[in-house]
Amino acid sequence: EAGVAQSPRYKIIEKRQSVAFWCNPISGHATLYWYQQILGQGPKLLIQFQNNGVVDDSQLPKDRFSAERLKGVDSTLKIQPAKLEDSAVYLCASSSIAGWGVYEQYFGPGTRLTVT
Amino acid sequence: KNEVEQSPQNLTAQEGEFITINCSYSVGISALHWLQQHPGGGIVSLFMLSSGKKKHGRLIATINIQEKHSSLHITASHPRDSAVYICAVRSSGSARQLTFGSGTQLTVLP
């Protein structure tokens, strides 16, 4: 079974530029998550999708961050414009059970963003 | 106070030592995960616990629901075990989402 795919793996941009990350979850996984992990901290949930609908985006800085999952499969996360404090690893994860209950999240390799 | 606290933050051990990483949480949970993160960012799920104890190879995870505490043990540690170990909980009130600890950086020296 192929894992969660993310691209690019690394990105360096200047502040005020735009950047987009892509995630392809494990086939058949209805739930997709985007996390931000700042160096030395645990991951922080940015947005959670259930199929192509948003379940939770309460911690997404909506003035500059946006995400979509148009066909309920792969997803993109965009930052426009980027700030220095956006430097972090952006992790995508997916899981197979849509409702309540115990389930596993499978993580992608992450995209390391450096904003200079 | 964070909902999930890990200790220690950093741990250096000699190859072969027995290692314990602790996780305490302050909310009611439906499950607790132990995750391993290698340099480069990728995260691998090691265990998912809701009670008792699980063992996989040299790794053992235990959880005490009453005390809101979990431990991850590594027996006969090896340099390839060097990684960040993260505890994450799924609260009873939000079964779909995980709250993460800040991680424990483990370095095992040969």
Image (cartoon, coloured by chain):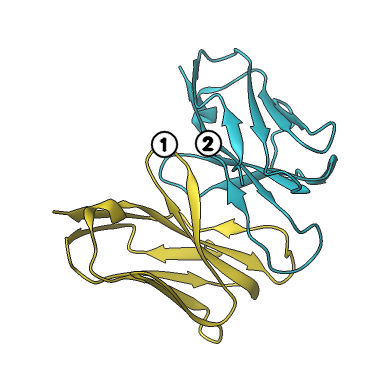
**Marks 1 and 2: in contact by CB < 8 Å?**
yes
Image position, residue B105 (x, y; %):
33, 53
Alpha-carbon neighbours of circle 1 within 10 Å: few (<14), some, or many (≥20)? few
What amino acid is at disc 1?
Gly
B89 horizontally vs B91: left or right = left
Image position, residue A62 (x, y; %):
74, 32
- Residue pointed to by mark 2: A110
Tell me where residue A27 sits by quadrant: top right
Q: Residue at x 64, y 17 (%)?
A: A81
What amino acid is at disc 2?
Gly
Tell me where residue A2 sits by quadrant: top right
Q: A88 or B40, which lies in front?
A: B40
Image position, residue A24 (x, y; %):
67, 35
**Chain letter, colour yellow:** B
Count of numbered tags = 2
C-alpha distance separating marks 2 and 1: 7 Å
Q: Residue at x 53, y 36 (%)?
A: A110
Tell me where residue A19 sits by quadrant: top right
B55 horizontally vs A31: left or right = left
Residue B107 seen from this side: yes
Alpha-carbon neighbours of circle 2 within 10 Å: few (<14), some, or many (≥20)? many
Q: B87 or A3, which lies in front?
A: A3
User: Chain letter of disc 1?
Assistant: B
**Chain letter, colour cyan:** A
Asked if badge 2 and badge 1 are on a common chain, one would say no
Q: Residue at x 78, y 48 (%)?
A: A30
Residue B40, label in figure: 1
Q: A31 or B70, which lies in front?
A: A31
User: Chain letter of disc 2?
Assistant: A
In the picture, the quarter occupied by the C terminus of chain B is: bottom left
Residue B64 seen from this side: no
